[in-house]
Amino acid sequence: MTAHDERFFFAGNSVRVGSRKWSVDYPVRDARLVGDNLVVLYDYTAGPRHRQFQNVQAFDRFGGLLWTAEHPTAEAVDAYIEFVDVSPLILWNFACYRCTLDPRTGKLLRAQFIQSN
């Protein structure tokens, strides 16, 4: 996936914020500016299959890793799949959780299980 915004750009494993560009370990599915930081959501299909995929990370504008998001479960198949909102920072999880994360630390603040019918 490729996205362009005046403030940031991503394509494959490459991310750019302003004039700073860096590589990440996995293909980027989506990214959002949250405050002064870029929160990156890696493509959940590109991660490991034998363990939980830690696929949401935040970077400062220079490419420095700030945090990796906590998951609501310890399941091996757990991963985040999309952004719901950025204020507050909420992501949808593969295990049907709507997860609110602390944008400063990546800590899980709230996990709401959404049952499907």
Image (cartoon, helix red, strand yellow):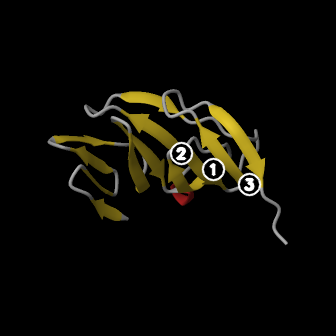
Q: Is residue 78 visible?
A: no
Q: Residue at x 68, y 51 (%)?
A: 98
Q: Is residue 41 visible?
A: yes
Q: Secondary structure at mark 3?
A: loop
**Up/down of 2 relative to 51, above or below:** below
Mark 1 and mark 3 in contact? Answer it, CB < 8 Å.
no
Residue 79 - label: 1
Which quarter of the picture shows residue 106?
top right
Quadrant where the image shows the N terminus: bottom left
Q: CA distance from mark 2 to mark 1?
A: 6 Å
The picture places residue 45, in percent across and down from the top left corner, at 55, 59
> Type of residue at label 3?
Ala
Q: Residue under label 3, please give it.
A: 95
> Type of residue at label 1?
Ala
Residue 68 or 114: which is nearer the viewer?
Answer: 114
Residue 55 - label: 2
Q: Residue furthest front?
A: 87
